[in-house]
Image: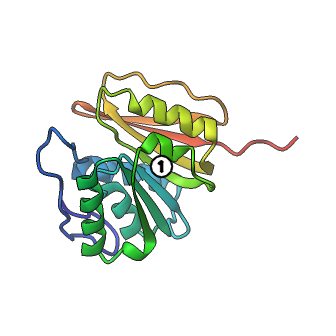
Amino acid sequence: MRIIGGEWRGRKIEEPRGRDVTRPTTDRVRESIFSSVYSRLPDLTDVIVLDAFAGSGALGIEALSRGAKSALFVDKRADAVKLVRENLALCHLEENAQVICGDSLAALGTQSGRFDIIFLDPPYESGLLEQAMEKIAQFDILSPHGIMVAESPQNQTLPELPAPYGLYREYRYGKIKVSIYHRAVEEEA
């Protein structure tokens, strides 16, 4: 697996062994995700990223390579956390990152700030994606104009979120669906 854009474009990063453990996002899907990100956030310079269910950390590392200010990576598996740290070191991005070994759902409720981009790619058919999306809306941790990227099987129906959260776009790549949600800026009364 390689970083596909930004300062560390072409840099090889490690991916988890065994597809039954983690299903890395393919280059094609990551490229599409970042095309969508750029359509909403053309400059990533001051962007703060959350890569929940991080796995290899490829999505968050891709954002850092493309100029994101900082990224928080969360995964409950010690081997995944070790891999994220190794991949950050390969790209010399440790200074801009925080890595937490813990439950991603629990971490959503403990964040004091907001994120500009949230990547959600939990194990399919686990129910974690829906729960994470609902917690993000409940705790309102997506910044105004922020985006949430949810990867799921193409036939999975995702929950409708309360305002100011809404579905922006959906893309399908074979058996994968990428849903982009945004947080609108609330009108002042």
Residue in the foreground of this view, choosing between 107 and 152: 107
Q: Relative to residue 37, is residue 155 depicted above or below?
A: above
In this picture, residue 165 sits left or right of residue 91 = right
Quadrant containing the N terminus is bottom left
Horizontal relation, residue 67 to residue 77: left or right: right
Name the spot of residue 110 as percent of width and height, x first. Answer: 57, 49
Q: Residue at x 21, y 32 (%)?
A: 174
Looking at the image, which is closer to me, 83 or 44? 83
Three-letter amino acid code of the residue under disc 1: Ile
Q: Provide the secondary structure element on which disc 1 rests.
A: strand
Position above or below: 88 against 176:
below
The location of residue 32, given as percent across then percent down, is: 33, 49
The image shows residue 104 at horizontal and vertical percentages of: 43, 44
Please count the marks in the image: 1
Q: In which quarter of the image is the C terminus?
A: top right
* Residue closest to the eye, 55 or 116: 55
Residue 72, placed above or below residue 161:
below
Instruction: Tell me residue 178's x, y (percent).
Output: 36, 38
10 Å neighbourhood of mark 1: few (<14), some, or many (≥20)? many
**Residue found at the very far right of the displayed protein:** 189
Query: Which residue position is annotated with label 1?
Result: 118
The residue shown at (34%, 63%) is 61
Identify which residue is drawn at 56% across, 68% down.
46
152 horizontally vs 97: left or right? left
